[in-house]
Image (cartoon, rainbow, N blue to C red):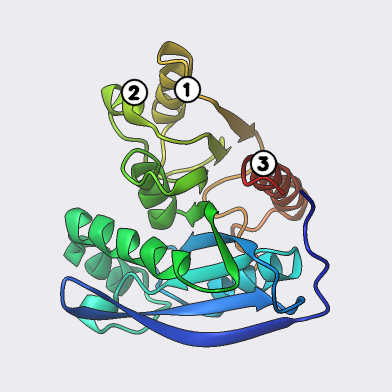
Amino acid sequence: MTMAVATGVTTSTVQWMSDGAALRGFLARPLVAPATRLPAIVILHEWWGLNDHIQEIARRFAGEGFVALAPDLYSRIGAAATKDPAEAAKRMDLLSSQAVLRDLNAATTFLKVQPFIDPLRLGVVGFCMGGTFALTQAGHNSDLKAAVAFYGKVPPIETLDYLLCPVLYHYGAKDGWVTKQEVDRLAQGLRQFGKPGAVHVYPEAGHAFFNDTRPDAYKPSEAKDAWKRTLAFLRTHLGA
């Protein structure tokens, strides 16, 4: 099976229901032959919300032949994206992890019924707060065949025994939010429970090193390497 060759990218705002709540997201997909069914990625945003940076990442994935859905994890609280760290922290604290799990399950259900998607080739990619949820989804959502987490918090080691898909984790060693002990715990858990996955550590990078809208954090060479590894990982495990 090979990736479909895209001639362009189309984007739209989409909605779906979860527990009676209307959720919204940004959808980017390649322009390919009408009968083509593509692999799809759920992209989980940082604590800032569904901003232009995350939408651009969705477009990049679409340019590589994936359908990309970026849910607005703040849909339930009706909050737009912010650049204020204090406001972002407040919004993240308002989130119910159980509600997010249900909302993301609903997002994959929404994707599975789209005529341009192969429902057996779904993955998730998350950044920061979204990276935390990507790891959680990997242990709860059997629709997912691959999970990539960029500098997300790591769950307790015993929960890693329940991982349902391969995991790729990117970490900047100078991260001030995710500790080295957490990342070591993830690597140990993968080994201990025989789960497929890999942890890549970038010694000179810190938190949010992939975010090219943040000059204080962005590391171009590390971001380029992480993107290359992410694409290779997803293409391997989504059958592309």
In the picture of the structure, the residue carrying the numbered disc 3 is 233
Q: Which residue is mark 2?
A: 161
Q: Nearer the viewer, residue 128 or 66?
A: 66
Q: Amino acid at mark 2?
A: Asp
Mark found first going from the N terminus, 3 or 1: 1
Q: Position of residue 184 (x, y in %)?
A: 46, 22
Callout 3: helix, strand or loop? helix
Location of residue 177 (image quadrant):
top left
Q: Position of residue 148 (x, y in %)?
A: 54, 45
Left or right of 153? Residue 191 is: right
Looking at the image, residue 163 sits to the left or right of residue 214; the answer is left
Identify the residue position indicated by label 1 in the image.
195
Can residue 25 be seen here? The reply is yes
Q: Which residue is rendered at x = 49% and y = 53% of the image?
A: 124
Specify few, some or many for label 2: CA neighbours under 10 Å numbering under 14, 14-19, or 20 or more. some
Number of numbered discs present? 3
Question: Where in the figure is residue 147, as x and y percent of width and height?
Answer: 50, 44
Q: Which label's residue is closer to the chain start, 2 or 1?
A: 2
**Badge 2 vs badge 1, beta-carbon distance below 8 Å:** yes
User: Secondary structure beneath disc 1?
Assistant: loop
- Which residue sits furthest top? 192
Q: Residue at x 46, y 21 (%)?
A: 190
Q: Is residue 21 left or right of residue 199?
A: left
Q: Do labels 3 and 1 touch, CB within 8 Å? A: no
Q: Amino acid at mark 1?
A: Lys
Instruction: Count residues near mark 3 (Cα–Cα under 10 Å), then give few for <14, some for 14-19, many for 20+.
Output: some
Q: Quadrant of residue 67?
A: bottom right
Q: Earlier in the sequence, mark 2 or mark 3?
A: 2
Determine crowd level at label 1: few under 14, some 14-19, many 20+ residues with C-alpha closer than 10 A.
some
Relative image position of residue 17 (x, y in whole percent): 27, 77
Which residue type carries mark 3? Phe
